[in-house]
Amino acid sequence: MTLRTTIALGYLDIHVALIASNALFALLSFTLLVLEFQPKPDYLPELLDDDVDYAMFKTPEEKANIFSRMVFHWLSPLINQGLTKQFDINDIWRLGYKYRPDVATENFQQHWQPELNS
């Protein structure tokens, strides 16, 4: 249906809220798409502890955008390396900082203690 027909039949008056909400959704979706393709920062400075070197815990998954995560494209370099040679311990990425055993244990204990006390 053309815009002229829509206006002539009065459908535009009835569906103004629907048209406006769809336009807003399309604009926000496009904005998210553009922002998702921007490079990710290596770290967020306001969240860092001074005594931890976060750069050594950075994994390709943390730098990947949403589309790369959906199709596991961030894993391609490791898969290609596995096709050419057998892995050794130096080929595998380190765990991300929040997945390190000491950090995960501390986080677990902080959440588990209130459960024990209640």
Image (cartoon, rainbow, N blue to C red):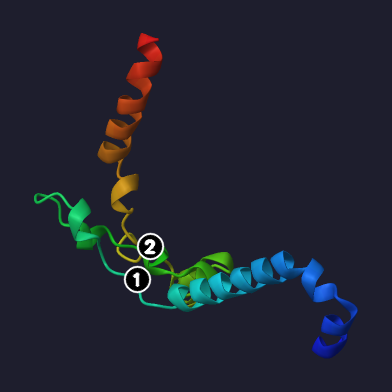
Residue 61 sits above or below residue 113 on the image: below
Instruction: Specify the quadrant that holds the N terminus.
Output: bottom right
Answer few, some or many: residues within 10 Å of disc 1's Cα (few below 14, many 20 plus, some between 14 and 19): few
Q: CA distance from mark 1 to mark 2?
A: 8 Å
Is the residue under label 2 in contact with that under label 1 (CB below 8 Å)? yes
Residue 49 sits above or below residue 29 on the image: above
**Image mark for residue 98:** none
**Image mark for residue 40:** 1
Which element type, helix, strand or loop, lies under badge 2? helix
For label 2, the residue is 62
Number of numbered tags placed on the structure image: 2
Residue 82: where, in percent of width, then height?
47, 71
Q: Considering depth in this image, is 92 or 110 the residue closer to the camera? A: 110
Q: Would you say 101 lies left or right of 16 here?
A: left
What amino acid type should be assigned to the residue bearing mark 2? Glu
- The residue at the point 61 percent across, 68 percent down is 25
Residue 65: where, in percent of width, then height?
46, 70
Which element type, helix, strand or loop, lies under badge 1? loop
**Residue 46 visible in the shown view:** yes
Residue 93 sits above or below residue 68 on the image: above
Q: Tag 2 or tag 1, which sits nearer the N-term?
A: 1
